[in-house]
Image (cartoon, rainbow, N blue to C red):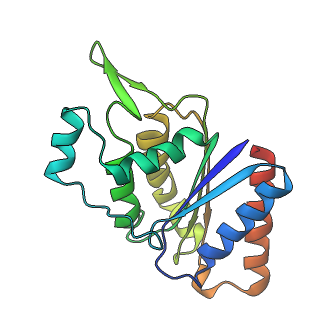
Amino acid sequence: MNNLVIFAHPNQKSFGKGIVDAVVKASEKKGANVRVRDLYEIGFDPLLKPLDFTDFQSGKIPEDIAVEQEHIKWADVITFIYPVWWTSFPAMLKGYVDRVFSYGFAYEYVDGVPNGLLKIKKGLLFCTTGTPSEIYAGNGMHNSMKQTTDEGIFNFSGIKEVKHTFFGAVPTATDEAREAYLKEVTKIVEETL
């Protein structure tokens, strides 16, 4: 089993990086191969450019996109780890999806109907928030974010088995709460692989 981790946080000391480390450790414990694509560390360019469209239409894939698509092809599990900012994921990750999950790679249309091309893969999403989980669960925001990512990106691309977990109030959480969060990450990864 191959687990591709896509990490989008500019702070290497963030709790999100702790989640990455827990995912790597749990994956390796299960005997899985794991690759981490830290989008800030690799300097991924999230801007979808006019030239990208020209290249796609001519059948050419820009080199940086082709590299990321090869990682996705390799993966059996795609794991997104990111902070929630303004009830969404960081622009860096949105740009990654915009450029890498492109038409003809992640999806196509057949007789006007969308067809996901990343079938048989699994998806994991681990998100940290500053807002307590009770607030986002209570006002429906968790469901809205899941609809956008789980349905709008993963399911649309053919990935049907998706597990999305939120860790709330991270900046003010106790060490015990953070440790419990990491144990939950480990459990989810071990159950998925």
Q: Which of 54 and 19 is in front in this view?
A: 54
The answer to which image quadrant residue 120 occupies is top right
- Measured from the top left, where is residue 171 in percent x and y? 58, 85
Q: Which of 60 and 99 is in front in this view?
A: 60
Q: Is residue 96 positioned above or below 135 on the image?
A: above
Q: Nearer the viewer, residue 153 or 6?
A: 6
Q: Which quadrant is home to the C terminus?
A: top right
The answer to which image quadrant residue 109 occupies is top left
- Measured from the top left, where is residue 128 in percent x and y? 56, 70
- Measured from the top left, where is residue 178 in percent x and y? 72, 78
Q: Which quadrant is home to the N terminus?
A: top right
Viewed as shown, does residue 48 lie left or right of 155? Answer: left
Residue at the spot x=39%, y=70% of the render?
Answer: 43
Residue at the spot x=41%, y=35% of the render?
Answer: 106
Q: Is residue 115 positioned above or below 134 on the image?
A: above
The answer to which image quadrant residue 17 occupies is bottom right
- Measured from the top left, where is residue 4 in percent x and y? 60, 51
What is the tally of numbered marks visible in this picture?
0
Q: Nearer the viewer, residue 192 or 134?
A: 192
Residue extending furthest toward the top: 111
Q: Is residue 24 positioned above or below 121 on the image?
A: below
Viewed as shown, does residue 54 lie left or right of 113? Answer: left
Viewed as shown, does residue 87 lie left or right of 51? Answer: right
Residue at the spot x=36%, y=54% of the render?
Answer: 64
Residue at the spot x=16%, y=49% of the render?
Answer: 51
